[in-house]
């Protein structure tokens, strides 16, 4: 049996579903249609195969996810990932935090930001712009009412346009939802070591 991962890491664990995923070979026409637009357009993961039990919801979820996380305007890809990472840390979603930490590092080259967030969580001290992003996404993920007008002003003072601020809200909010699905439907397990 694989060991469940309990600590934050930028090494992406395997996500092991509690529910038996849909088998591609026996998927219905509706399930196959819903899986055509996967979240990153990189293949059909066990998570997507699990969500395919409800093809109507999946058919709406994946295009929305893609627009939020891979949109061309607004926040940079790295900062969208920072919003998702912030939400995932607050929600203690080890799998999502690993995925988005890894992507943030890939886009920004800023492993130091991830290390500080993983070490200090809500108390992480960062440079002005990432700090404003992190603080806002963390507050929004803890209790939405915590994200105040002062926090929104701090985003503007850190140089974020209104569109960038909206993108941050969307990336953190969709992970409030995604983290809860990940927790409910499965768990992160350590990848088997190569022989």
Image (cartoon, rainbow, N blue to C red):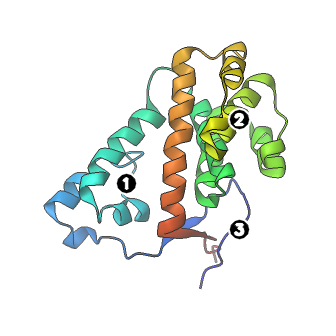
Question: Which residue is found at the position 45% from the left and 34% from the top?
Answer: 68
Residue occupied by mark 3: 6
Residue occupied by mark 1: 43
Q: Are marks 1 and 2 in contact (CB under 8 Å)?
A: no
Please, what secondary structure does the residue beneath circle 2 have? helix
Mark 1, Cα crowd under 10 Å, few <14 / some 14-19 / many 20+, is few
**How far across and how far down the image is residue 84, in percent?**
59, 42
Residue occupied by mark 2: 134
All told, the count of numbered labels is: 3
**How far across and how far down the image is residue 13, in percent?**
61, 64
**How far across and how far down the image is residue 71, in percent?**
44, 28
Mark 3, Cα crowd under 10 Å, few <14 / some 14-19 / many 20+, is some
Which of these two is toward me, 186 or 98?
186
Earlier-in-chain disc, 1 versus 3: 3
Task: Give the number of the disc on residue 75.
Answer: none
Please, what secondary structure does the residue beneath circle 1 have? loop
Residue 25's place in the image compared with 31, above or below, is: below
Which of these two is toward me, 43 or 62?
62
Question: Which residue is found at the position 60% from the left and 46% from the top?
Answer: 100
Quadrant of residue 130 in the image?
top right
Q: Is residue 142 left or right of residue 178?
A: right
Q: Is residue 85 visible?
A: no
Earlier-in-chain disc, 1 versus 2: 1
């Amino acid at each position: 049996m694989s060991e469940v991962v309990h600590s934050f890491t930028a090494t992406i664990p395997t996500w092991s579903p509690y529910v038996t995923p849909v088998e591609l070979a026996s998927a219905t026409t509706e399930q196959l249609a819903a899986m055509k637009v996967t979240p990153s357009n990189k293949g059909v993961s066990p998570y997507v195969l699990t969500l395919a039990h409800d093809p109507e919801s999946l058919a709406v979820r994946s295009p929305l996810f893609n627009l939020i996380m891979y949109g061309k305007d607004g926040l940079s890809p790295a900062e969208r990932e920072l919003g998702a990472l912030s939400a995932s840390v607050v929600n203690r979603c080890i799998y999502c935090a690993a995925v988005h930490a890894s992507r943030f590092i890939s886009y920004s080259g800023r492993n130091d930001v991830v290390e500080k967030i993983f070490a200090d969580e809500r108390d992480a001290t960062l440079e002005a712009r990432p700090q404003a992003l992190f603080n806002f996404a963390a507050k929004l993920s803890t209790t939405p009412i915590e994200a105040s007008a002062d926090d929104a002003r701090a985003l503007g003072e850190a140089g974020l346009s209104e569109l960038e601020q909206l993108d941050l809200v969307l990336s953190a909010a969709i992970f409030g939802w995604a983290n809860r699905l990940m927790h409910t439907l499965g768990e992160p397990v350590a990848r088997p070591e190569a022989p």
